[in-house]
Amino acid sequence: MPEILSESFFPKINLQESSNWAKDFVQEVVIPRLPEAVAGHFSVELLAILVMLLCAGIFVAVVPLLPLVLVLAERKVAARFQNRTGPMRVGPWGTLQTLADGIKLIFKEDYIPPQGDKILFMLAPYVIFACSFAVFAAIPFGQNILVSDFNIGIFYIMAISSVIVMGVIMAGWSSNSKWSLLGSLRSAAQIVSYEIPLGLSILTIVMLVGSLSMSQIVASQAGGIFTWLIFRSPFTFLAFFIFFISAIAEVNRTPFDLPEAESEIVAGFHTEYSGMRFALFFIAEYANMFAVSAIAVTLFLGGYEGVLPGYDFLGGLPGFVLKTLGLVFLMMWLRWTLPRLRVDQLMNLCWKYFIPISFFNIFGTGIWGLIFETDDVWSIGISCAIIYIGLISAYAIAGRIFARKPEPQPSSA
């Protein structure tokens, strides 16, 4: 009986690395194109290291451009919500405003608190910056656009993103400021708390696919929109929203931006930072926004696979980027729509609601896997029907709740 349960219920996850992509690229692409006299002086291992360094250099050069675009996009989105034009002075329609702000920050004074820990103070922004960009190494942007096809890619992403907490605490402690320390502790408590429902939501995907590899997770969604894992079962549909809301809290975005609430604690853990070190924190924040949206697209929304089976509509690198930017826009939309939560509401939402619902999703996913051993038309159809009925019911209940008139309160006079 235990053997039957272990074979049928628990996924078989291969933890052995099958091949090195850099060596394969060197042997199949680079060496055949080199002259024999030149190829004989270079070993495959050396060329593989050079290829990996080249890919790392491309990512380090390209990924920092994302915050330049996203900061300008957020300012324009905020202006649109507030019925104004936003930045319009620098460049055509204000497109060079973020670049001008970056140049200004480069020339600003680099202030270090004299009574603080100088080494940790200087090291903290680089720790957050490096961890934010290391996540991109395991995200598949296309069929062959992947820095490294880790067989435990999602585990690597969770591990690297958790180190950001260390940089936040280092920044708050080394500043020798009560405001920075308070902001860092609040941020650490928030990030550590919301990592739990975020990781539990990812576990539902691992249970369905049976792999920790990001590329295999995308390959399992190759049959069009109805084979995306968000529609594979009603529990993964619910897990997507738990994941996305937890990701918003992870990157300290409104309504979960308590660590950086200027009206409460000045500016959070980076209060004492200025100049380019201050800019590194914002570059990391917007890079994290794009990264968590890309992870959500990979896990739940088909990744680089197209919407229609057999057609490359919204597929490949352009489709992946469009889906990711759609989730980034949703984050910006929520920021300029919802008010900030209190700290007790923030923790209650995580510990009293998200974590129990995440455990319910894991249990339900296991039951769903036992009932529907293979994903076919019937299982996906039943899943979509349950999701549709659940959305209609939630809409009706919410309409009744918000339609109630508040009871008149007795006058204080």
Image (tube, grey):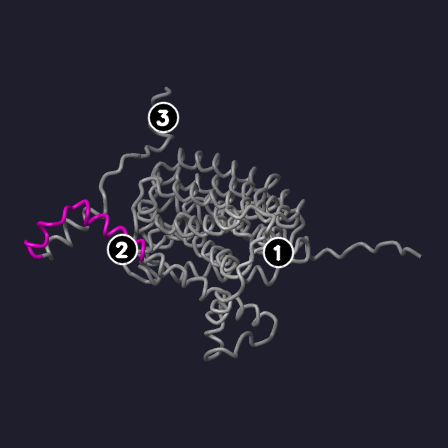
Towards the viewer: 399 or 155: 155
The kind of residue tagged 1 is Ala
Q: Residue lying at the far right in this picture: please name it.
A: 413
Q: Position of residue 399 (x, y in %)?
A: 64, 56
Quick check: is 54 in the magenta stretch?
yes
Q: Read off the residue under disc 3.
A: 6
306 vs 401, left or right, is: left
152 w.r.t. 112: above or below: above
Which mark, by number, is residue 164? Answer: none
Q: Residue at the spot x=65%, y=56% of the render? A: 266
Quadrant in which the N terminus is drawn: top left
The kind of residue tagged 3 is Ser
Q: Residue lying at the far top in this picture: please name it.
A: 1
Q: Read off the residue under disc 2.
A: 54
The kind of secondary structure element at disc 3 is helix
Quadrant in which the C terminus is drawn: bottom right
